Amino acid sequence: MKQPAPTHAVDMLIVGAGFAGLYMLHKARGMGLDALVLEAAPGVGGTWYHNRYPGARVDIQSMEYSFSFDEALQQQWRWSERYAPQPELLRYANHVADRFGLRDGIRLSTRMAGAHFDEPSQRWTVQAESGESWSARFLVMASGPLSSPNLPDFAGLKDFAGPVYHTANWPHEPVDFSARRVAVIGTGSSAVQAIPIIARQASELTVFQRTAAYAAPAHNGPLDREFEARIKADYAGYRARNRRMHGGFGSLLPPNPVSALAASADEREAAFEQRWKIGGFAILGAFNDLLLNEQSNALVAEFVRGKIRAIVKHPDTAQLLSPTHTIGCKRLCVDSGYYDTFNRPNVRLVDINQAPIERITSKGLRTSGGEFEFDALVLATGFDAMTGTMMRLDLRGRDGLRIQEKWHAGPLNYLGLGIAGFPNLFNIAGPGSTSAFTNVIVAIEHHVDWIADCIAYLDAHGLHTIEASEQAEAAWAEHVNAAARRTVFLSCNSWYLGANIEGKPRMFMPLAEGFPRYADHCAQVAHDGYVGFVLQ
Ligand code: NA7
């Protein structure tokens, strides 16, 4: 197919060629829609294109973190490890693009600048930064919940004489830290994965920590071929059982259906220990109220702190590495040797909570506690999550309503899928949906299928547009908030709350009620003729 000419008309314009954009394109084509993906990067893969820092890998097991929509794909693709590393995930994204013939529907190196809704035609005019533009009936934001890196405004950053890397925007050529003094700022999931590997290469590694992280061991290794065969014998059944789990994964190890407070100390210890040996998120299911009740949460948090004390030899370092907030309130990190790395003689940990960074200097950085010198700086400072990418766009709905105005106090929407004033715009795996608490590929497949059904409904009923009603949005915002209030998630400064970005409005963004309830809710809305949406 020829590249579309500027001001070309398509049925659907999709923003982003990560897993969401790829599946949306495939699905749209299957419905006979003329769809086009705009992708800012020169390759497909989204998250797995950009986050190629040392040690980057998925924190959900690969037999689960993969597409389920095509039986032949899931049978034929073979993961090498229990938790796939980034290069393999990127190969998988490319394989999907090739296998389903998607490449001719993707415009790479084409960054969307904005989109305006045109009342007379009831269509979106989408502009790229290149100046090209397209007219589209539907606009699907598949731009990802974690796609705008957070680059804190450190004074003096441009004065630093050495290279500065961000984990979410890592160079494509190999970065060699050998014989170099390296600094890492941040200790979230990305840092926890990168630090053990950088420490093995660098002559010295200094880690600047604002908040200590809870990390559970991945126990990663080659994928057990017997396990793979067992899953593949009934992959569809396994996927269906996972979709009935709270996070869209983990059906082989359901949460223990009792409260941590109902168990004896010995029973608790045994349950935590058993789940720690399994690794990953398993420990948070050792009892059914660990993320709901602060007292129960404190018990598992103390268990993990005990593990940190057992692993880290120097008591002061162990103390500093021991988080004090509720566990799971920030996403639990899944690690391979993170805490043990701090036993190495070439690694030191610096507390920037007590003594914050004052400025970056040409040779390193200065905190209120002292000067530090290094040759390369790694920012593992996360993302302006869930809303950052859309809020950077010139996105205008009916009557020129700007997304920045609409979302000035937080991301209002209905079901996470539609926004009042922004007709025929769908958001995949964004705020207001269970995305961040779900195996995101399950969330993506669910959203894409829902959007496809919705478009089929519009067409079958001779309707042109659909958008959320303001009443449904207000009720949904309360629903999302109420779900968070039933958990421990409001008790710390997480990116779920927008609290990691200075000046960002604090609103709990992902829906914490669990994927099955959310999916049932979305199905009911569709079944009832898209109640809560305005259809015209
Ligand atoms: P995260 O989890 O948001 O971690 C970012 C880290 O950077 C975290 O330790 C932050 O400390 C720290 N940070 C952020 N801004 C600053 C400033 N200004 N000064 C010092 N330290 C700072 O991002 P990741 O990339 O690791 O992981 C994101 C998600 O990707 C993760 O949840 C998984 O889903 C995969 P803080 O905790 O805010 O005090």
Image (spheres, grey):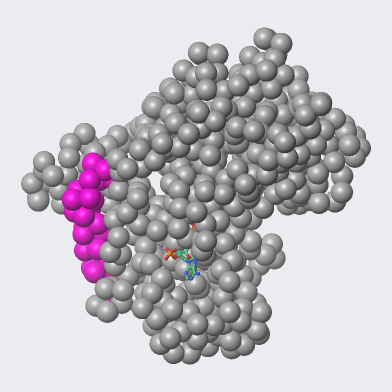
285 vs 86, nearest the viewer: 285
The vertical placement of 345 against 105, above or below, is below
Q: Nearer the viewer, residue 210 or 102?
A: 210
Q: Which residue is found at the position 46% from the left and 18% from the top?
A: 524
Indicate yes or no whether the magenta region holds residue 313: yes
Specify whether residue 373 is in view: yes
- 452 relative to 329 in the view: left or right: right
**Corner quadrant of residue 369:** bottom left
Secondary structure mostly seen in the magenta stretch: helix
Q: Is residue 44 at all visible to an observer of this figure?
A: no
Q: How many marks?
A: 0
Taking the spot 15% from the left edge, 51% from the top edge, the residue there is 269
Relative to the observer, which residue lies in front, 272 or 158? 158
Residue 108 locus on image (x, y percent): 78, 46
Residue 441 location, x and y as percent? Answer: 53, 37
Q: Residue at x 65, y 84 (%)?
A: 159
Of the 4 image quadrants, the one containing the N terminus is top right
